[in-house]
Image: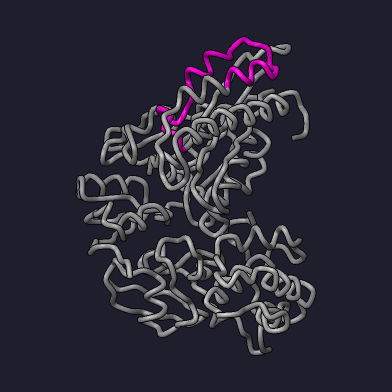
Amino acid sequence: MQVPASVDYERATSLDDAIGRLERHGDGARLIAGGHSLLPMMKLRLAVPEVLIDINDLAELRRIRVDGDVLRIGALARHADLLASAIVGEQYRILHDAERVVADPVVRNWGTVGGSLCHADPAEDLSAAFGAIRAEVVARGPGGERVVPVRELAAGPFETVLAPAEVVTEIRAPLRPGTGSAYVKVERRAGDYAVAAAGALVRLEGDAIADVGIGLAAVGAPHSVAAETEQAILGRPADEATLDLAATAAAEECAPVADQRGPSDYKRALAGELTKRALRTAIARARGQEV
Amino acid sequence: MQVTMTVNGQPYTRDIEPRMLLVHFLRDELGLTGTHWGCDTSNCGTCVVHVDDVPVKSCTMLAAMASGREVRTVEGLESGEGLDPVQQGFVNEHGLQCGFCTPAMMMTARWLLDHNADPSQAEIREAISGTFCRCTGYENIVRAIRWAAEHPRAAAEAPVQEPKEAQPA
């Protein structure tokens, strides 16, 4: 039987209350929302917080809305909320593609978008998806609010650049009409972490790639994106030759480790192939094709 | 710490350690052993219960987090009118072998049918993909849920489930 080590539990009544509690308790405190990554780690003693601060009552952090030309996703939105949001699916197909393969439907009912990003698991899907679309997170702390690009949020595996008393309140992405996006993942079985996964967002001018973002999950890509591959194909025609170039570049750019999900060479080849597939679908969607 | 929650319509208050998981609270504190406890890692999904009308894996939620909320377990499926159609479907279509995953399969199916009264085979398979049947009896489980979809009469008489939170994936 696996149970967490002894821990204190408190429930935050507001965002400021949560920040105040984090400040008072210092390093030993952890926020808990869905807890679907934190509690398994606590059972294994990979995480041993002294106090958990439950933020599930902060309904104001769960809203998903468009504000002017910005999509604003509350950090406490459940994965299922993101998947059920029509506006998210219209604006960023990549987010619905990714959410369909995050864990399983029951886990998605409780796990949160902000929690996934803040957990900074290198195999987690949303860092790659939100990284591909260059989203930003809003973090509130005792000193006020600041904005951190998703691409700069992770400081390393399971570590972020956030200060101990900072709380991610929402994820923001500007609406970008005319872009197309997609996310593809290979997993060993339904609901598993990725063997490898890739996400892409593309804007075309004529037939040239005018803007591109590429995210990679579970293959050791720095910040879960393929920044060099983006540069390599920017301005090139949106054709198969460019996709081949992207596949080669992405395979070189990532640094997968061998584990029970496969050897590193296989994952590297897969990262290239999935980059190509994600780009191909994103390009087709940017052209208004139904794929 | 003291927690208070409603389980199958009954209020319960208990003094527990904050680290106690909801699955152990239900089984050990309340004696509701219909909710099973399998892998401990939110993979096997045998511990699914409804919390505020949404299926969740109770091995990955602290009982403290469920305090103040409404929990429904497999013991709450049967109503005064008899078995829930989902339960009857599992009986009629031989939807269980060892029975270990059955409570979770049925709770997941109940929620699916509350939100999608006529799910396709693919939609059923997607909905139950968070719970493993190690007897690999999925064909009959899917048939059992289809049976319940085709015989919803008793469901209309069961307590009304207002969808509050997530939508079907």
From the viewer's side, name the closer residue of A260 and A202. Answer: A260
Q: Is residue A221 magenta?
A: yes
Q: Position of residue B22 (x, y in %)?
A: 40, 70
Measured as percent of width and height from the top left, residue A48 is found at 24, 54
How many numbered discs sit on the rendered protein?
0
Is A40 included in the stretch rendered in magenta? no
Image point (23%, 64%), residue name = A6
What stretch of residues is rendered in magenta? A218-246
A147 or B32: which is nearer to us? B32
Q: Is residue A171 visible?
A: no
Q: Is residue B139 visible?
A: yes
Q: Which residue does the image show at 47% across and 27% down from the upper left?
A: A225
Q: Nearer the viewer, residue A91 or B127?
A: B127
Relative vertical location of residue B77 with respect to residue A95 in this rendering, above or below = below
Residue A146 figure quarter: top left
User: The C terminus of chain B lies in which quarter of the figure?
Assistant: bottom right
x and y, in percent, of residue B99 in the image: 56, 79
> Where, by quadrant of the figure, is residue A213 drawn?
top right
